[in-house]
Image (cartoon, grey):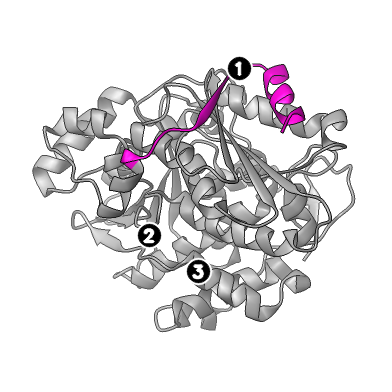
Amino acid sequence: MKYYSLQHNSPNVDFKTATILGQAPDKGLYFPDEIPQWSKEFIESIQSLPIEEMAYRVMAPYVGDTIPESVLRKIVSETLSFDIPLVRVTEDIYSLELFHGPTLAFKDVGARFMSRCLGYFAREQKEQVVVLVATSGDTGGAVAHGFYDVPGVEVVILYPSGKVSPVQEKQLTTLGKNIHALEVQGNFDDCQRMVKTAFADDYLTQRIFLTSANSINVARWLPQQLYYLLAWKQWPFKNQKPVISVPSGNFGNICAGLIASRSGLPVEHFIAACNVNDVVPRFLQGEEYSPRRALATLSNAMDVGDPSNFTRILELFDQSLTDLTKILSSVSITDSETEETILRIFKETGYLLDPHGAIGYLALEEYLREHPGKKGFFLETAHPVKFPESVERITGYKIPVPEHVKPIMMAEKKATFIHGDYESLKKYLENF
């Protein structure tokens, strides 16, 4: 398997090089030169196939010969070492709970896979690897815990000051050692722009070996396919393809799902469920694609005004909007609709949604109302305890803190405050 740049002005590379570089030299995102096709027998065997074997078969073609089979099997086993249950909410709607990992968010899967791959590759690197990543909330904690104490790898995480929840902030600022948190005066788009500028700075990259752990990195993006297969493994209606609603910000998650469907995973339809940052919903409804400054919402991890991974989705469908909209639609949900959904579903079913999951739920509910007889699931991407102020205010319910999170909440925050301009980041990295 080779990977090419979506800017089409850099050499094709293998999985190792794409993972280490993060972004191609021409600043394009890497994309696999072929999409593996799963046999009908493989799809039918998923229900009985051990999870580790299923995951290995999915990831092996993407990794190629860059990682030995025994090492890759160990990596996928450690990546999926926690439960990812498909839980019934109503007769027609199920929740794929992706918050049972160490940092209570879906990004644990990609971060754990990538950290182990990069840790393996770093042993062969002569220079120290510096992982530079921007986070709108959950990425930071997942990357911090995934890379914590990995030899030969230092991690620098940028997060927007005052725009992540208390649990999210603690998870990315309390570890220390090789994890360095930068609290940025600005929003997520500012953080992401600073990171992109750093990778484009030849002066800096000639002095520091930088790579990315955002979903632009193939090693973090591609393994997200695995939980879509785990959902199919648990899907109770095998004679009916599911409609899948994915809370979407930077669009790496739903892009992974779309790739899984192109490989052969049975899917009726995808919904990219967005908050009021509606660049993609507007585009899919016929307007011009026009990135804009992100607006702050309850679902802060989706506050993205220029989603990087949407270019990969267009590439997957050969830039054909007609083909894309046959399987993908997108809607925008307001904060007031999010709050109403959290309260209504809690009262009606007892199921507690986080703000991101609530957007996924409502988008799916509305789609099923317009398409009677269909069933589906949404991705519950984070534990509600990560958003206690909003969820507890809306429901009046005190969310119990999971036992393994309590020590983190008591730990001391370690972060460096910087202004939201590239020169501030550059100065920090130069003195790193």
Q: Which amino acid does label 1 sit on?
A: Gly
Q: Which residue is drawn at 69% across and 26% down?
A: 428
Residue under pointer 2? 242
Q: Which tag, 1 or 2, sits closer to the chain's start?
A: 2
Residue under pointer 1? 420
Q: In this rendering, would 66 be left or right of 169? A: right
Q: In this rendering, would 39 be left or right of 142? A: right
Viewer-closest of 342 and 150 = 150
Q: What stretch is highlighted in magenta?
A: 409-432
Q: Which residue is drawn at 37% across and 40% down?
A: 411
User: Which part of the image, by quadrant, shows the N terminus?
Assistant: bottom right
> In the rendered image, which quarter is residue 19 located in?
bottom right
Give the distance between the C-alpha atoms of the residues marked 3 and 1, in whole angstroms. Answer: 36 Å
Give the distance between the C-alpha atoms of the residues marked 3 and 2, in whole angstroms. Answer: 28 Å
Question: Total marks drawn?
Answer: 3
Which label number is shown at residue 78? 3
